[in-house]
Image (tube, rainbow, N blue to C red):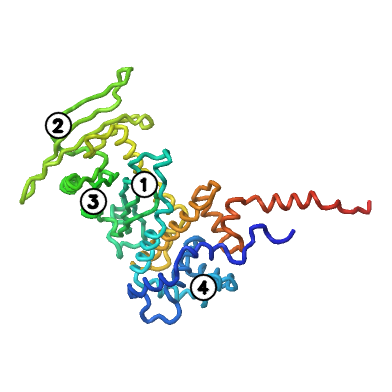
């Protein structure tokens, strides 16, 4: 059998990084002081090597450098003109500002986010999906508590666990982070809720950690809708209370119009909202939601909040498919660079997945890309029709004349 039917004259990885603009990356790096005192290991080489390491799920600098040596003849396809040593990569992770990789991610998101948007006109998604944003955070555990202030305490030693908290906002119809901030694990989530950057018509789905009367009232004044889960200790005044029952006499939904009051030195904040309590059939318990949307049907409010689960799935996807248990440097800068590169890798693979006609799970696609990353195969040919080589081989075998036998 001859060459693969998926054969192409460049590794699959070179097709992945074609989504990147080399000249733009160098320009971004210069704007963020990433090219100072650099002779050969520029930001493009740094990014390509780090992306390679993250996609391949390498756990150490030694694995990265050894693997690059084994693939030396293919590096020219990636625009790499030097062999990267452990010390070179370690120094770059320590010295090149993580702001370079943050700017690269934000530029990539701005360029490609429209490719990821689902179309509500198809009828498959409700109209409010395009306006819905989801906000939450996830904590990445670290071995040291010196770089980022830890949270919680070990039950035996009493020591706090070091960690970096990744505060994230996603648009529900895109599924990738649109805004990200890093803080220590001890930082309260509510700081990420910034009404000033929101616009009239936006919808925010969030956890109860973001409840702040002042910010919620500011959102209401701007025409921004929010949906969140109630806290147990909230104090409010009930203005109206209505309960709807099912034909069997059980509660279907309870709607309460309420008023919250917060006393400040300058003025009192008065905030009006609705509490919508529904029955979760799976968990067998009542779920109270808080929203300033006074007009939408309760079912819509419930569906908006349920969409919040998408951000939890995103965190799970990133942590399962990319190495965030082992870091390629001990400095805060190196840790942030690796997280930004992980987010870039997740974005690139999500874009490529969107271009396939065949259905793949993200984990399945990420695993297969990892296996074939340096193979000379066409991405879309292989992943749209992976069994083509086998079918071609079986057809050739069936059409070939039978082998002669001496017996």
* Residue at the far right in the pictured view: 407
> Reading the chain from its start, which is encountered first: label 4 or label 3?
4
Count neighbours of disc 1 (C-alpha within 10 A) and say few if under 14, some if 14 to 19, many if 20 or more. many
* Residue at the far left in the pictured view: 266
Q: CA distance from mark 4 to mark 1?
A: 35 Å
Foreground residue among 7 and 153 = 7
Q: Is residue 135 left or right of residue 347?
A: left
Q: Nearer the viewer, mark 1 or mark 3?
A: 1
What residue is pinned by disc 2?
Answer: 238
Query: Where residue 205 appears, x then y in whole percent?
Result: 29, 44
> Reading the chain from its start, which is encountered first: label 1 or label 3?
1
Is label 1 in contact with label 2 (beta carbons under 8 Å)?
A: no
Name which residue lies at 39% across and 42% down.
120
What residue is pinned by disc 4?
Answer: 79
> Reading the chain from its start, which is encountered first: label 4 or label 1?
4
Foreground residue among 150 and 241 = 241
State which quadrant residue 347 falls in: bottom left
Q: CA distance from mark 4 to mark 3?
A: 43 Å
Is label 4 in contact with label 3 (beta carbons under 8 Å)?
A: no
Q: Nearer the viewer, mark 1 or mark 2?
A: 1
Query: Where residue 244 appears, x then y in whole percent?
Result: 26, 23
State which quadrant residue 30 falls in: bottom left
Q: CA distance from mark 2 to mark 4?
A: 65 Å
Q: CA distance from mark 3 to mark 2?
A: 25 Å
Query: Where residue 156 appears, x then y in whole percent?
Result: 32, 52
Count neighbours of disc 4 (C-alpha within 10 A) and say few if under 14, some if 14 to 19, many if 20 or more. some
What residue is pinned by disc 1?
Answer: 172
Q: Which mark is residue 190?
A: 3
Query: Where residue 158 appears, x then y in whole percent?
Result: 28, 54
Q: Secondary structure at mark 4?
A: loop
């Amino acid at each position: 059998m001859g060459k693969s039917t998926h054969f192409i004259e460049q590794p699959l990885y070179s097709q992945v990084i074609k989504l990147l603009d080399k000249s733009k990356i160098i320009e971004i790096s210069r704007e963020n002081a990433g090219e100072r005192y650099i002779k050969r290991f520029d930001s493009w080489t740094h990014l390509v090597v780090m992306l390679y390491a993250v996609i391949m799920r390498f756990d150490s600098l030694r694995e990265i450098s050894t693997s690059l040596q084994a693939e030396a003849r293919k590096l020219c396809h990636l625009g790499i003109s030097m062999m990267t040593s452990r010390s070179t990569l370690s120094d770059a992770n320590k010295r090149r500002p993580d702001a370079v990789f943050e700017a690269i991610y934000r530029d990539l998101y701005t360029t490609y986010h429209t490719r990821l948007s689902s179309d509500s006109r198809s009828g498959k998604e409700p109209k409010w999906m395009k306006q819905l944003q989801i906000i939450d955070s996830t904590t990445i555990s670290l071995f040291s508590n010196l770089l980022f202030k830890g949270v919680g305490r070990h039950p035996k030693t009493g020591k706090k666990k070091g960690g970096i908290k990744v505060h994230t906002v996603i648009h529900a119809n895109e599924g990738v982070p649109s805004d990200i901030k890093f803080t220590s694990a001890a930082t309260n989530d509510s700081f990420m809720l910034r009404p000033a950057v929101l616009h009239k018509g936006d919808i925010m789905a969030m956890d109860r950690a973001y409840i702040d009367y002042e910010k919620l009232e500011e959102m209401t004044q701007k025409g921004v809708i929010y949906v969140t889960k109630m806290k147990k200790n909230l104090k409010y005044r009930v203005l109206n209370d209505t309960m709807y029952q099912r034909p069997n006499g059980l509660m279907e939904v309870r709607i309460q119009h309420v008023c919250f009051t917060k006393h400040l030195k300058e003025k009192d904040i008065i905030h009006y909202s609705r509490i919508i309590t529904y029955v979760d059939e799976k968990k067998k318990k009542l779920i109270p939601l808080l929203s300033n949307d006074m007009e939408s049907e309760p079912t819509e409010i419930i569906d908006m909040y349920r969409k919040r689960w998408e951000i939890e799935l995103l965190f799970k996807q990133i942590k399962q498919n990319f190495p965030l248990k082992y870091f390629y440097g001990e400095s805060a800068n190196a840790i942030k660079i690796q997280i930004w590169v992980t987010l870039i890798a997740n974005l690139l693979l999500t874009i490529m997945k969107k271009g396939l006609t065949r259905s793949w799970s993200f984990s399945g696609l990420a695993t297969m890309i990892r296996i074939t990353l340096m193979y000379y195969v066409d991405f879309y040919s292989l992943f749209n029709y992976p069994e083509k080589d086998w079918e071609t081989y079986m057809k050739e075998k069936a059409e070939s004349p039978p082998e002669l036998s001496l017996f």
